[in-house]
Image (cartoon, rainbow, N blue to C red):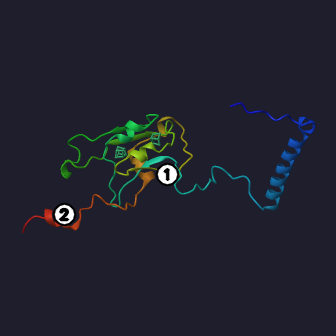
């Protein structure tokens, strides 16, 4: 499709209407700022934008209500991540043997925040609701290594997630059925 460009009028060709409009907006902001009517700047990074609910910022890992890591090292997020920002080290077979080998919490879980594009695919694909994009939109560090977040840091930043469905909690009927006979 060819978009026809509108021919400029003689006045528009002088750029005066554009300059006048720019001056009008600048003057309005100047008056608003001087009179304190409306702030048009902020003291970033001390002040930050308040992002709306559902904002897709940096992805972090979360724990369940009982403080357990929800991730089960299925590696779906690692597979789906478009820029390959995730690297998971699954547990060996002997890890958490006290729990009968059912605990699959990763040994390490890395997200390279320099690569992450905050796309949300990891959150979409996670069967355990263990990874969520949160509100942080401005991540800084003094080295590349610092921008690779490991499991402990991701869990600390993610915090506890209040799950509506607590699939780890046995239903009362199941608990009674599995209780040893006295
Ligand atoms: S938000 Fe996207 S880019 Fe970032 S870790 Fe998740 S899948 Fe990868
Ligand atoms: S965060 Fe979710 S998708 Fe990624 S490995 Fe853990 S359980 Fe699987």
Where the C terminus falls, by quadrant?
Answer: bottom left
Q: Nearer the viewer, residue 154 or 146?
A: 154
Q: Which residue is mark 2?
A: 174
Vertical arrangement, residue 182 with respect to residue 44, above or below? below
Residue 24 shown left or right of residue 93 in the figure: right
Crowding near the residue tagged with mark 2, few <14, some 14–19, many ≥20 C-alpha atoms within 10 Å: few
Q: Is residue 133 visible?
A: yes
Compared to residue 175, the image places residue 135 above or below, namely above
Where does the image place residue 109, in percent across and percent down from the top left? Answer: 37, 42
Q: Nearer the viewer, residue 62 or 150?
A: 62
Residue depicted at x 38% and y 52%: 129
Q: Quadrant of the N terminus?
A: top right
Indicate the position of residue 145 as horizontal and vertical percent values. Answer: 47, 36
Give me the disc on residue 134: 1
Q: Is residue 153 visible?
A: no
48 relative position to 117: left or right: right
Q: Is residue 89 left or right of residue 113?
A: left
Numbered-mark total: 2
Question: Whereabouts is ligand 2, in terms of quadrant?
Answer: top left
Q: Residue furthest front?
A: 1
* Residue occupying the point 60% across, 56% down: 50
Mark 1 is surrounded, within 10 Å at the Cα level, by few (under 14), some (14 to 19) or many (20 or more) other residues, namely many
């Amino acid at each position: 499709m060819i978009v026809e460009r509108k021919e400029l009028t003689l006045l528009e060709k002088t750029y005066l209407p554009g300059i006048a409009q720019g001056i009008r907006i600048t003057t309005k902001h100047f008056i608003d700022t001087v009179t304190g009517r409306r702030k048009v700047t902020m003291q970033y990074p001390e002040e930050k934008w308040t992002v709306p609910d559902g904002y897709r910022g940096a992805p972090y890992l979360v724990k369940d209500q009982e403080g357990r890591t929800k991730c089960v090292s299925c590696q779906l997020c690692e597979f789906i991540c478009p820029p390959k920002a995730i690297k998971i080290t699954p547990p060996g077979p002997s890890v958490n043997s006290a729990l009968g080998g059912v605990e699959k919490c990763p040994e390490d879980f890395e997200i390279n925040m320099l690569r992450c594009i905050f796309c949300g695919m990891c959150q979409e694909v996670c069967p355990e609701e263990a990874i969520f994009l949160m509100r942080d939109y401005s991540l800084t560090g003094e080295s590349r290594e610092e921008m690779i977040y490991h499991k402990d840091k991701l869990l600390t930043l993610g915090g506890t997630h209040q799950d509506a469905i607590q699939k780890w909690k046995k239903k009362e009927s199941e608990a009674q059925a599995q209780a040893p006979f006295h």
